[in-house]
Each structure stands twice: as structure tokens, then as C-alpha cells.
Amino acid sequence: MLTGLPSRLAAYVTRTVRVTGELTGNGQLLVPSALRVQLGSRWIAAEL
């Protein structure tokens, strides 16, 4: 599961994304530190 503000993440629901961050102790929740969105052959940093 990914944490974040739904209003910021909603725009990326149908896109291919790469998320980096830290897993919680039980490994069930990802607290993101960076989000990149694929646009064609490029990856663009997105606001969390």
C-alpha cells in the first residue's frame, strides 16, 4: 500500500509510475520519497 495525498496521486492512477521510498517495519506500507511518471520514453518527476 502507498501513502500519500489522494488529490495529488489521482492524476497518476492510469499512468506507469516509479515510486521510491521507505517500507514500514512490517513491509506493508510504502512511505514515498519520490514519484516519477512515464511520458513516452521519458520519466518525469512528479509532485507528491
Image: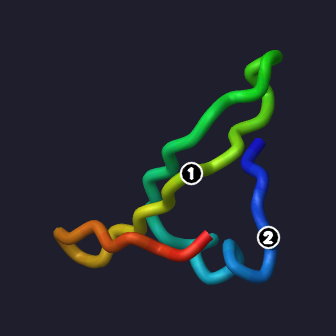
Which circle's residue, 1 or 2, is located before the other in the chain?
A: 2
Camera-nearest label, 1 or 2:
1
Q: Quadrant of the N terminus?
A: top right
Labelled pair 1, 2 in contact (Cβ < 8 Å): no
Image coordinates for residue 23, horizontal then vertical, percent: 68, 29
Q: Where 10 falls versus 21 (above or below)?
A: below
Q: Where 8 falls versus 38 (above or below)?
A: below
Residue 25 occupies quadrant: top right
Image coordinates for residue 21, horizontal then vertical, percent: 57, 41
Image coordinates for residue 37, horizontal then vertical, percent: 41, 69
State the mark number for residue 33.
1
For label 1, the SS is strand
Inspect the image, locate mark 1, and give the three-letter code of the amino acid beneath it.
Ser
Q: Residue at x 73, y 48 (%)?
A: 2
The color scheme shown is rainbow
- The residue singled out by tag 2 in the image is 5
Residue 47 occupies quadrant: bottom right
